[in-house]
Amino acid sequence: MENFADKVETFLDKQLELYGSLESVFETEKKQLTDMDVEGLWATVAAKKQILGQLTEINRSMMLLIQECGWYPDKEKEELSLSDFISHLPVPQNVKRHLKQIKSTIEHCRDKVFASAMANKHYVQESLLVINDIFTIAKDANSQKNYNVAGQIQNSNATRLINTEV
């Protein structure tokens, strides 16, 4: 079973590395958003897709490992919990503690990545609202009647808005 624990540790270490990479990608994306670097944003999207694909593959591999080990969760639980699996591994407590510590670090990184993603999403939404407001103002300005120096509506024979004589 220590062989399984070593494999789990390898998967967890790779996950931790990928979440760290994803975190730096979101930091880069934040800078690209503020700089309005569209080409850079496309590259960032591709990098995120690649990292998420690798994370998905690691999760699949871990599920296969758990099935290979012959451990199945309680029938009452619908989700397979890595913490439960680690708890049931017949390895020394220090190994279990180490694996749970890595898992906890991954969860912390995942939370930071999620927070960065939400912050970037909020920034994009706010930027789009500002752009939308600018277009609305520009559109409204074009549709309003403009007055010339004489106080008359341009392109109209209407009377003056302001009539003063000196």
Image (spheres, rainbow, N blue to C red):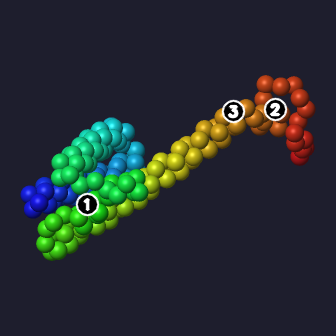
User: Marks 1/2: CA distance?
Assistant: 78 Å
Residue 52 appears in which quarter of the rendering? top left
Mark 1 sits on what residue? 85
The quadrant in which the N terminus is found is bottom left
Q: Residues within 10 Å of mark 3 (few under 14, many from 20)?
A: few
Residue contact at pointers 1 and 2, CB within 8 angstroms: no
Q: Label 3 to label 1, Cα distance in Å?
A: 66 Å
Amino acid on which disc 1 is placed: Phe
**Closer to the observer: label 3 or label 2?**
3
Residue at 40% in and 48% down: 33
In the drawing, does residue 42 fall left or right of residue 119? Answer: left
Q: Amino acid at mark 2?
A: Ile
Q: Position of residue 99 (x, y in %)?
A: 20, 66
Instruction: Give x and y (percent) for residue 41.
Output: 35, 42
**How many residues crowd around disc 2 within 10 Å: few (fewer than 14), some, or many (20 or more)?**
some
Residue 153, label in figure: 2
